[in-house]
Image: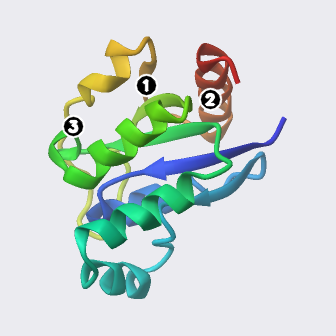
Amino acid sequence: MARRVFFSFDYRYVWKVNQIRNMPNVIGTAAAGFQDASLWEEAKKKSDKAIKAMIDKALKNTTVTVVCVTYGTSTRKYINYEIDQSLAKGNGLVAVRIHHLKDKNGTGKPGAIPPQIKANGFKAYKYADKERLAAWIEEAAEIAGK
């Protein structure tokens, strides 16, 4: 079954995220509409309220939120907002560690799993391949009753 999935991540690591988010069995893999650097640069010029409105719009019609975890993820304001809004709308959540994937700067340090994940009965994994990610997305949807 194809799922509409929201990817929550620190935009500094978009290269890592783009390696995994264009999966054939996942529909609408967007992160608050920030699909390229120009959109992110434009969003940074907007108010906090406007950015939250973009996030809310991107979360519509999604059933699972994949939180891509790297160093510092759990302290990022908009990631925590995305997680809280995902929980409020009943989305499943899954944390996926991606620090070990290579980008233009090499690999990175692991980050802490945002506490809302495990506190709400959801799981965290280290990214291995797209097939496992698809299974984790389904598992998160089942935990959420979706």
Q: Are marks 2 and 1 in contact (CB under 8 Å)?
A: yes
The residue identified by callout 3 is 110
Q: Which mark is residue 125?
A: 1
Give the CA separation, mark 1 to mark 3: 12 Å
Q: Which circle's residue, 3 or 2, is located before the other in the chain?
A: 3
Q: Nearer the viewer, residue 49 or 117?
A: 49
Farthest residue, direction right: 1
Q: Element under label 2?
A: helix
Q: Which circle's residue, 1 or 3, is located before the other in the chain?
A: 3
Q: Element under label 1?
A: strand
Vertical relation: 93 (above or below) 17: above
Q: Which of 54 and 20 is in front in this view?
A: 54
Position of residue 33 measured from the top left corner of the image (x, y, whole percent): 51, 70
Position of residue 51 measured from the top left corner of the image (x, y, whole percent): 34, 68
Amino acid type indicated by mark 3: Pro
Vertical relation: 78 (above or below) 33: above
Give the colour scheme of this rendering. rainbow
Task: Judge from the rendering whether residue 58 lies leftward or rightward of residue 123; answer left or right.
Answer: right
Identity of the residue drawn at 55% across and 49% down: 6
Q: Do the residues labelled 3 and 2 touch (CB within 8 Å)?
A: no
Q: Which circle's residue, 2 or 1, is located before the other in the chain?
A: 1
Identity of the residue drawn at 49% across and 29% down: 93
Q: Which mark is residue 132?
A: 2
Residue 29 appears anywhere in the view? yes
